[in-house]
Amino acid sequence: MDWREEAHAAAVRHGVEPAERFVAQMGVESVNFDPDIIAQHRLGPTGGRGIAQFMTATGNSVASMIGVGRDEFWSDPFCQLDGAAWLMKRLLIRYGSWAHALASYRAGDGNLLRWLDSRDTLLPFDETVRYVSRILRMSPEATQSLLLPEGADDDIGPVSMPALAFDPMAPFSPNDSRWAGWACSLHTMQQALESVGSSMTYANLYHLIVDVRGIGDADLGFRDRTGQVMAQMFRDLGYRARTEYPVDFDRVWEDAGHEPMCLSIDGHNHWLFVRSRVDDDTLGLSNSAPGHLGVDQTLTRWQWAQIGGGAAAVHIDVPEGEDPSVIAALQARLVELSTNNQELAGQVQERDQQLARLREELAHIADVIVPAIVSAPTEDAREALAEKVHEIRETRVGPRPAGVAA
């Protein structure tokens, strides 16, 4: 098996650029793709597991976010590569820098943010500096300077992501205490959509809400007490949705098993799908998120009373007269368009970079080559310089359209 090719393919699937740098990262993580480390016959130098060298807790969380179970994730190096590429893409979006993304992957967000804080005395770990240096092919001294406040951009830090009711952003790191609850909310939405005939996968939902934020103007808050935000998300996907807040146990029990419903109880940090009635005093709940609280969970009338506070329920249904297959087709088209939009944004960025290089070349022509042509001592020299201008124009701008004079 050529694991370099597989790592390259994972980077391409998740939009990690340049893909060759991700291949180099996985090579360093797995000690040059050591078969014993990949097969987990032994741990890596830092105690990680598998080809991507995830710690167990981090790997479990990443598995949940890419929609696979823990057992499948840890037994399949392909899943681990997908998880690593998925995580690196988000770290690159967050920090805008390969040095910072790699340092976060290796040492964790908490340590990186401390290194970048001018008020903190913690210095980058030597092991992390060597790791980043090796992948980026930089000197340790240059790498360390990038991981200190004076080497970082002024605006380093989390970018704006889906807003939470009580928090400024969605959690980026599996080590964030909010991560599990937020993942549960997305899994709950996906399970509710599945119950009304949608074919949207968890990856589709994550892509729409997080990567391109393509559903309406509202973002999902996992502590959305009233359910209004989640209801709007369902409406934007073509369904009827209504909220009840506050709602009591008897009201939820009455509808349980008869219509799809999502539930959040004050004191819980995530949403759950109401699956069924277990008995007269018990609700069956689930959020389908592997490895998290809420999977096939039950909630009794007594537990509801002990939690106290208010609860919110979001009911969803197919609009009267609508064909579920039509809604599913529209959702598939929405995913396709949002993916195309993301690819287009990448093309626009690439074109902007090309234009920036072109401006540099034109400035060089205006400031250096044109004066040289004017002052060239011989006609042959002037022709040679003019040919250089033509060459730059053809390679940077492209052939002149037919009918346009030279």
Image (cartoon, grey):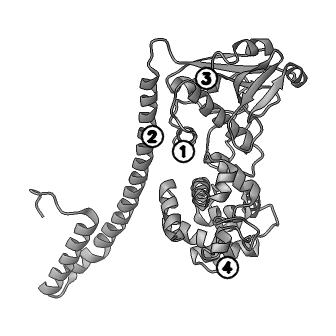
- Element on which disc 4 rests: helix
| Callout 1 touching callout 4 (CB < 8 Å) | no
The residue singled out by tag 4 in the image is: 141
Residue 400 placement: quadrant: bottom left
User: What's the residue at 54%, 30% (across, down)?
Assistant: 217
Residue 372 placement: quadrant: bottom left
Q: Which three-letter amino acid code belongs to the residue tagged 4?
A: Glu
What's the CA distance linking mark 1 and mark 3? 20 Å
Residue 334 seen: yes
| Callout 3 touching callout 2 (CB < 8 Å) | no
Specify the label residue 211 is tagged with.
Answer: 1
| Callout 1 touching callout 2 (CB < 8 Å) | yes
Front one among 301 and 269: 301
The residue singled out by tag 2 in the image is: 338
**Mark 1 or 4, nearer chain start:** 4
**Mark 4 or 3, nearer chain start:** 4
What's the CA distance linking mark 4 and mark 3? 52 Å
| Callout 1 touching callout 3 (CB < 8 Å) | no
What's the CA distance linking mark 3 and mark 2? 21 Å
- Element on which disc 1 rests: helix
At label 1, counting other C-alpha atoms closer than 10 Å, the crowd grade (few under 14, some 14-19, many 20 or more) is some
Q: Which three-letter amino acid code belongs to the residue tagged 1?
A: Asp
- Element on which disc 3 rests: helix
Q: Nearer the viewer, mark 4 or mark 3?
A: 3
Q: Is residue 246 above or below residue 273?
A: above
The residue singled out by tag 3 in the image is: 231
Q: Nearer the viewer, mark 2 or mark 4?
A: 2
